[in-house]
């Protein structure tokens, strides 16, 4: 009878360990699920940020090109001589200010896309 009595507490402690293990596995599974949801939200936010950056750069580029064309058209319409004084600032804006910004953003955009 002493053998049967000693098996009882050991079986109870095994049941307790199994229950604790099951609870721990449940917590880990919930954590994985939440981590997966957070990861998906982070991906959505990155995509939204990248889209916004792309739209801003394209918009800035379009506005700058539009203004440059407008200045040149106004000069032609009002019979102004198109000379270096008029063309040089437009070219400077397009080449030294806008081009590096566009290059930087495009490099960032495609660089982060390749890392993912």
Image (tube, rainbow, N blue to C red):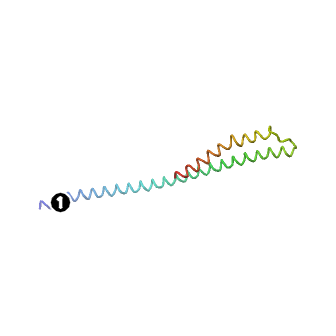
- Residue at (65% x, 46% y) in the render: 102
Residue furthest toward the left? 1
Secondary structure of the residue carrying numbered label 1: helix
From the top left corner, tell me how far across and down residue 62 is, in percent. 71, 49
Quarter containing the N terminus: bottom left
Report the residue marked by disc 1. Answer: 7
Residue furthest toward the right? 79
From the top left corner, tell me how far across and down residue 34 is, in percent. 45, 54
Residue furthest toward the top? 85
Q: Nearer the viewer, residue 33 or 53?
A: 53
Q: Residues within 10 Å of mark 1 (few under 14, many from 20)?
A: few
Rendering quarter of residue 8: bottom left
Q: Nearer the viewer, residue 21 or 103?
A: 103
In the rendered structure, the answer to whether residue 107 lies left or right of residue 91 reads left
- Residue at (79% x, 46% y) in the render: 70
From the top left corner, tell me how far across and down residue 33 is, in percent. 44, 56
């Amino acid at each position: 009878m002493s053998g049967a009595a000693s098996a009882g507490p050991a079986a109870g402690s095994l049941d307790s360990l199994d229950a604790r293990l099951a609870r721990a596995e449940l917590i880990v599974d919930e954590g994985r699920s939440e981590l997966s949801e957070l990861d998906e939200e982070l991906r959505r936010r990155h995509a939204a940020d990248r889209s916004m950056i792309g739209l801003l750069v394209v918009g800035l580029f379009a506005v700058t090109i539009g203004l440059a064309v407008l200045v040149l058209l106004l000069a032609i319409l009002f019979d102004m001589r198109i000379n270096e004084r008029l063309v040089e600032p437009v070219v400077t804006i397009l080449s030294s200010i806008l081009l590096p910004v566009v290059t930087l953003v495009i490099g960032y955009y495609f660089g982060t896309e390749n890392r993912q």
